Image (cartoon, rainbow, N blue to C red):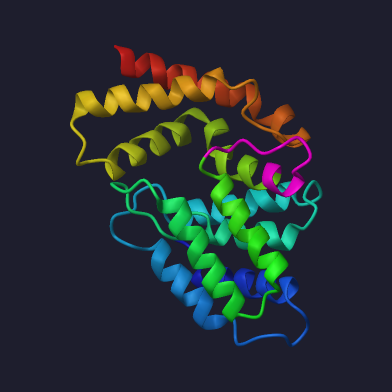
Amino acid sequence: MADLDALRLRFARALEAARAPGGGPDPAPYADDLLARWQEPQRRYHTLAHLTAVLDHVEVLAEHAADPDVVRLAAWFHDAVYLPERSENEERSARLAERALAEAGVSPVRTAEVARLVRLTVTHDPAGDDRDGQALCDADLAILAAPPSAYAAYAAEVREEYHFVPNDAFRTGRSAVLRQLLDLPRLFHTPHGQEHWEATARYNLAAELELLST
């Protein structure tokens, strides 16, 4: 079970580091709103466990990022709005970040950067010089390189989130997503991701695709 107090502290530290000293209201209500969103009942994979994992992976990749505190905030907001049957979750999450961070005292430049990073998780295809985007996207996709049992649990949780989709339609759609990922020249963009996650992720994706085809 997630440690809510520890997560509140992590959000507060990221917010306070991203804004000017003494430059805004108490972080607690913003943290609580986000934590409530991440615990909504329709979520199976996109839960506090996923949020915590992404935050942990951001720490691993922090040295690669140009502005790690902005990346940390983007991790908090990247799936803050999540309804499996809707296609505009990233855009709605980005707009939530724009509203909340402006109110919380984050500068317009950094607020815009958080929102840009959230929108980037639609494609997970950052530019070659986009160090913040590379860090966030790699952190978000690190689950693809999980050990077999953890990857199987992830795949099962994704299926549970799309419980309203018939089996044949889910197999077709999920297979298309997996093929699209496997067709990318690279899944990960940071040196750490390429060295430690790329090969395992491709193995996992290919194994799931084969399973869906049988």
| Residue at 38% in and 55% down | 82
Query: What's the magenta region?
Result: 123-134
Where 43 sits versus 4, above or below?
above
Horizontally, residue 161 falls left or right of residue 23, namely left
| Residue at 56% in and 38% down | 141
| Residue at 49% in and 51% down | 50
Find out whether residue 211 is within the magenta segment.
Answer: no
- Which quarter shows the N terminus? bottom left
Residue 194 appears in which quarter of the rendering?
top right
Horizontally, residue 156 falls left or right of residue 127, namely left
Residue 137 appears in which quarter of the rendering?
top right
Where 146 sits versus 6, above or below?
above
Q: Can the viewer see residue 9 in this picture?
A: yes
Residue 47: x percent and y percent?
Answer: 42, 55
Where 22 sits versus 1, above or below?
below
Q: Main secondary structure of the magenta part?
A: loop
- Which quarter shows the C terminus? top left
Horizontally, residue 110 falls left or right of residue 148, namely right
- Decide which of 103, 191 is in the foreground and name it: 103
| Residue at 77% in and 58% down | 67
